[in-house]
Amino acid sequence: MDPILLLLRLVHVLLGVFWAGTIFFFAAFLLPSLGDIGPDAGKVMGALQKRNYVNVMPVIALITIISGILLFYKVSGGFSAAYPRSHYMGYGTGGTAAIIALAIGMILIRPAANRMGQIMQSMPSTPPGPEKDALLTEVQKLRQRTALGSQIVAGLLLLAVILMAVTRYV
């Protein structure tokens, strides 16, 4: 086997599992739990930001996608026109779903998560009153946007994972 092809598959599968698994956990368990605990959720979001979660995940997603494109290029004979119309078109469809998921994450989720982190860091120094109430209202809206975006991304990544897993065999 071609060592480059093996390396690309290894990177693609390992990072893809990490990306999808993390998003599934985030959308199905972490965000709903944060919603249950209320204002203290800011501490968890702040800890995630401190560990660069909102910066690391897009990099992992991008490397996953780039390695997938390179794999597709290699196995399709240089993006042969016949390949996407073959029974392997599931790879292209799954890859497209992953690219859309990354775009939604970058456009919808990441800015909302960053803004939430900024607000939550300023909360302790904000005195009670209308300003603090406005910030709490903004955090709630950002949390809803993040939850919706995460559910959409999780669905797209689920589609990508399913297509990547079964395309070879159909």
Image (cartoon, grey):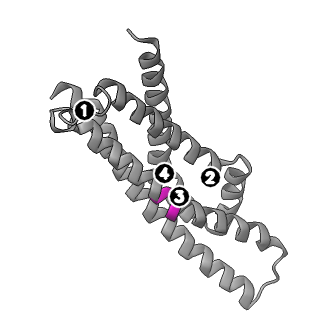
Residue for point 48% across, 47% down: 23
Q: Mark 1 highlights which residue?
A: 80
Q: Nearer the viewer, mark 2 or mark 1?
A: 1
Crowding around mark 3 (Cα neighbors within 10 Å: few <14, some 14 to 19, many 20+) is some
Q: Earlier in the sequence, mark 1 or mark 4?
A: 4
Between circles 4 and 3, the one closer to the viewer is 3
Q: Residue at x 61, y 68 (%)?
A: 38
Would you call the spot at circle 2 few (<14 residues within 10 Å), some (14-19), or many (20 or more)?
A: some
Tag 1: residue type?
Answer: Ser
* Measured Cα–Cα span from mark 3 to mark 2: 9 Å
What whole-number distance in Å separates the C-alpha atoms at marks 4 and 2? 17 Å
The three-letter amino acid code for the residue at tag 2 is: Val
* Residue matched to label 3: 106
- Quadrant where the N terminus sits is top left
Distance CA(mark 4)–CA(mark 3):
21 Å
Q: Is residue 71 shown in magenta? A: no
Q: What is the magenta range?
A: 104-108
Question: Looking at the figure, which quarter contains the C terminus?
Answer: top left
Q: Which mark is residue 29?
A: 4
Task: Work out whether residue 70 or residue 62 is closer to the camera in this orientation and state it.
Answer: 70
In the displayed orientation, state which residue is furthest to the top: 1
Nearest the viewer among 141 and 3 is: 3
What element does badge 3 sit on?
helix
